[in-house]
Image (tube, rainbow, N blue to C red):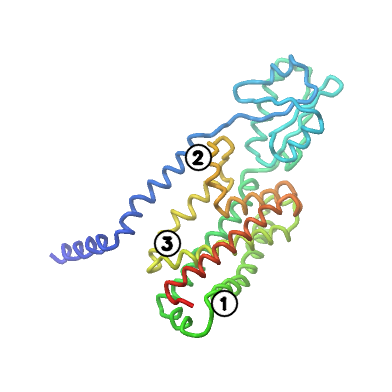
Amino acid sequence: MNTWTVMKRILKQFRRDKRSMALMIAAPMFVLTLMWLVLDNQDDSLDIGVVDVPDQVAEQLETDDVDLHTFSEEEAESQLEDASLDAVIQWKNGKPFLTIEGSDPNTAGSVQKAVSQAFAPDTNRNVEVDFLHGSEDLNLFDYIGPVLIGFFVFFFVFIVGGVSFLRERTQGTLERVLTTPLKRSELVLGYLGGFGIFTILQSLLIAAFSIYILNVYMTGAFGYVLLVTFLLALAALSLGTLLSAFAKNEFQMIQFIPLVIVPQVFFSGLFPVEGLPVWLQAVGKIMPLTFGAEALRGIMLRGEGFVDFQVDVYILVGFALLFALLNIFALKRHRSL
């Protein structure tokens, strides 16, 4: 009888909390749909540029899994530097020279396998292999390490910042602060500034631990990694504090994870998105983690300088400012100034 009473109380709670009930059903379906869209539409073909390669050899190379593109030497080098090509084969003095882009160990392995199979019948033709980025020793963790650094920084700052700001409201601190002459903008900026100092320390420790203790592959400047992780944390903090305005308790704040955090994982670079429909790739362009992960991967794997990833930096700053501005308007729910 007591058990039935407890069951009825739980069912009544769910009936009153329609948002939680809807999320328990809708969120898993939403995440599964994203997984299906991303993982079921993979384009595994390799893009290889050819420079002065004889037609007969090109016919050997081109298969269902290999798309060949003819370029001049300068064009091929530029495309390879931009990671638009997976590799380039040049023909010099009757011999093939293979240059692999190299920042993705899986793709590099596939390129070497495809090229070696194409030249297998001609045992007298050795292919000289060089890597533009990385090396043969680059492993999977080196490839996904920059993305994981960005993801964990973003995830924990989002949760800690959002829940902390929510507690200010649920414990009545926010209402008391808003009865003072303090402006909403000053409150939001003060909160971002206070947490910002903590996120600088967090970014420093996480990046240093990953690079110098876990030995994640790093060929760029450490200061650039710190800059991007800090901006990523700032965007997560401003987003977390914004969404906390729409949550009544910590449980509802956690419910934002499958809707806000999980989708970003699919577009952050852990999974290739080049073969996805254009509209689906556009979804990733509204997610801060996409730009943070891309910048970190460029710095750590390809040694990019500020000029190469500056657009990602500006976009992260834009996200942080936009979320902070929306948060200022959201605070109108508590007091109109």
Which element type, helix, strand or loop, lies under badge 2?
A: helix
Residue 84: where, in percent of width, then height? Answer: 69, 36
Q: Nearer the viewer, residue 71 or 326?
A: 326
Instruction: Report crowding for label 3: few under 14, some 14 to 19, many 20 or more residues within 10 A (C-alpha).
Output: some
Instruction: Report crowding for label 1: few under 14, some 14 to 19, many 20 or more residues within 10 A (C-alpha).
Output: few
Q: Earlier in the sequence, mark 3 or mark 1?
A: 1
Residue 200, placed above or below residue 215: below
Residue 5: where, in percent of width, then height? Answer: 16, 65
* Residue that label 1 marks: 186
180 with respect to 252 (left or right): right
Quarter of the rendering containing residue 211: bottom right
* Residue that label 3 marks: 254
Q: Nearer the viewer, residue 82 or 147?
A: 82
* Residue that label 2 marks: 38
Q: Nearer the viewer, residue 160 or 210?
A: 160
Residue 89, placed above or below residue 332: above
Which element type, helix, strand or loop, lies under badge 3?
A: helix
Quarter of the rendering containing residue 130: top right
Residue 3: where, in percent of width, then height? Answer: 17, 63
Amino acid type at image mark 2: Val
Which element type, helix, strand or loop, lies under badge 1?
A: helix
Amino acid type at image mark 3: Ile
- Of discs 2 and 1, which sits in the foreground? 1
Q: Earlier in the sequence, mark 2 or mark 1?
A: 2
Q: Nearer the viewer, residue 248 or 315?
A: 315
Q: Quadrant of the N terminus?
A: bottom left
Amino acid type at image mark 1: Glu
